[in-house]
Image: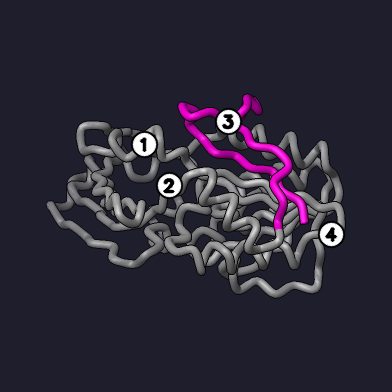
Amino acid sequence: MKRKAGNETTSQERGDLFEDPRLASLYDQFNPWAACDDFYLGLAREIGGSVLDLGCGTGRLPCRIAIEGLDVTGVDPSEAMLRVARSRPGSERVSWIKATGQALHSPARFDFIYMTGHAFQALLTDDAAISLLRTVHDHLTKNGRFVFETRNPAKKAWLLWTPNHRNCITTPERGRIEESREAAFDGMTGVVNLTHSYRFLDEGNTVTGRTRLRFIEQDHLRRLLTAASLEPQAWYGDWDRTPLTQVSPEIIVETRC
């Protein structure tokens, strides 16, 4: 257990909260392997061939897919997250690229491209989303598939992002760490402004930061896909591939060129 060091508060103002190495190293502990990871791992096995993970974060999923013997590339704009990814056992099986999805220019083409962790919601405008989707289009093989998810705005997930909903973990290095969020929703833009707080309880300090996520409906998403010449093949409402409905927690879409 670490000794308390005072009540310092550090504010992380960058758009990407996880550029902070302290938080990047904790990401997997606050976000353990879940049904979404099983979903994309299953698709990678089903589709085979070459795989591109856009917004790969700490690299847990691409490393796991690479163990299956597939050719995997992981792309992320955060150096702190990629540093964690490169330190994983088996990370040498994955090709790592530091870039945003929009800025990716690779001669390679991929049979399966995916974007998970609700990373698509970090694209706050139609222009940004279409740019990303066009990049995906240009990096798919002829019969390749692109699959990603965004939270269904009808479920209003932001209502649960309050300081009263807290998650606490205990780590050998930093002791107890408590995570909480506070959300402000803009109904005009569909953008949620999120304030994240990480309290290092045994050290007596707090790291705070701000991120933004956009919520869009299925019809809006369909228009964005059309603008990028991507054709939806299937719509799911949850990780068990149940059909999308108004009350589904997720909007998961499988596309082709």
Is the C terminus in the top left, top right, bottom left or bottom right quadrant? Answer: bottom right
Residue drawn at the location 33% of the way across and 45% of the way down: 174
Residue position for label 2: 26
Q: CA distance from mark 4 to mark 3?
A: 27 Å
Residue that appears at 84% across and 59% down: 141
Query: What is the secondary structure assignment of the residue under circle 2?
Result: loop
Q: Residue at x 75, y 38 (%)?
A: 43
Q: Marks 3 and 1, Cα distance to the nearest angstrom?
A: 16 Å
**Up/down of 118 relative to 236, above or below:** below
Could you tell me the amino acid type at mark 1?
Ala
Determine which residue is flagged by label 4.
141
**What is the crowding at mark 3: few (fewer than 14 residues within 10 Å), some, or many (at least 20)?**
some
Q: Is 146 on the left or on the right of 80, as rendered?
A: right
- Position of 73 with respect to 144 (left or right) is left
Q: Earlier in the sequence, mark 4 or mark 3?
A: 4
Q: Which residue was labeled with disc 3?
A: 244
State the image coordinates of residue 230 (x, y, percent, origin top left): 70, 56
Alpha carbons under labels 1 and 4: distance apart? 35 Å
Residue 70 covered by magenta stretch: no
Report how far apart the C-alphas of labels 2 and 1 lie in the structure. 23 Å
